[in-house]
Image: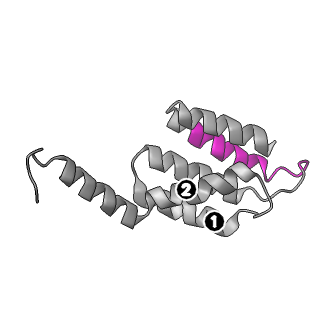
C-alpha cells in the first residue's frame, strides 16, 4: 500500500498537481493508522514526499525541514529510490546550494564582455 501512495504522490508531483500530491500524503498518513493494516513506519516517506512538493513550490526552507525530518525517520534498509532521492533533494534545498544558485544568477546577468 505504501508503494501505491508513494508512486501516486510522485506522479502527481511530477505533473505539478501539488495539492493532489499533498492530499495523497494526508491519505497515506490516515491509512497508516487503520487497525486492519500491517504496521509500517510511513512518516519518513511522507516527509520526503512533502519535501519534494515544497521544492516544486520553491519553498526551500519548508522543503529543507521536511527533508531533514525524512532523513531522521526513513529506514536505511527500505526503498532504494527513497534513499537516493532524499539526500539529493536535501542538497538542492540547503542554504549553501541556494547561495551558489544566487551567485550563478548574478554572474549570468553580467554583460558577456565583462572580464571581472
| Quarter location, residue 3 | top right
Is residue 44 shown in magenta? Answer: no
Which residue is situated farthest in the bottom direction here?
A: 72
Q: Which residue is mark 2?
A: 88
The spot of residue 16 in percent (x, y) is 49, 33
Residue positioned 55% across, 37% down in the render: 13
Name which quarter of the figure residue 20 lies in: top right
Q: Residues within 10 Å of mark 2 (few under 14, many from 20)?
A: few
What percent of the width, then of the height, locates residue 86?
Answer: 60, 57
| Residue closer to the observer: 11 or 37 | 11
Return the x and y of residue 72 as percentages of the image width and height: 65, 69
**56 vs 108, nearest the viewer:** 108
Q: Image height check: is 5 above or below 102?
A: above
Q: Position of residue 97 (x, y in %)?
A: 39, 61
Q: Colour scheme used in the picture?
A: one colour
The structure residue drawn at horizontal position 62% and vertical position 33%, both measured from the top left corner, is 11
Q: Is residue 56 visible?
A: yes
Q: Secondary structure at mark 2?
A: helix
In screen coordinates, is 83 left or right of 61? right
Mark sitting on residue 71: 1
Please give the range of residues in magenta: 20-37
Label 1: which secondary element = helix
Amino acid at each position: 500500500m505504501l508503494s501505491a501512495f508513494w508512486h501516486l504522490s510522485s506522479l502527481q508531483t511530477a505533473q505539478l498537481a501539488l495539492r493532489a500530491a499533498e492530499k495523497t500524503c494526508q491519505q497515506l498518513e490516515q491509512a497508516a493508522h487503520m487497525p486492519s493494516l500491517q504496521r509500517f513506519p510511513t512518516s519518513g516517506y511522507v516527509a520526503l514526499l512533502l519535501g519534494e512538493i515544497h521544492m516544486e513550490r520553491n519553498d526551500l526552507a519548508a522543503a529543507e525541514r521536511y527533508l531533514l525530518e525524512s532523513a531522521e525517520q526513513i529506514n536505511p534498509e527500505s526503498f532504494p529510490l527513497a534513499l537516493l532521492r532524499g539526500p539529493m533533494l536535501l542538497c538542492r534545498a540547503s542554504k549553501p546550494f541556494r547561495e551558489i544558485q544566487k551567485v550563478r544568477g548574478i554572474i549570468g546577468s553580467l554583460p558577456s564582455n565583462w572580464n571581472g
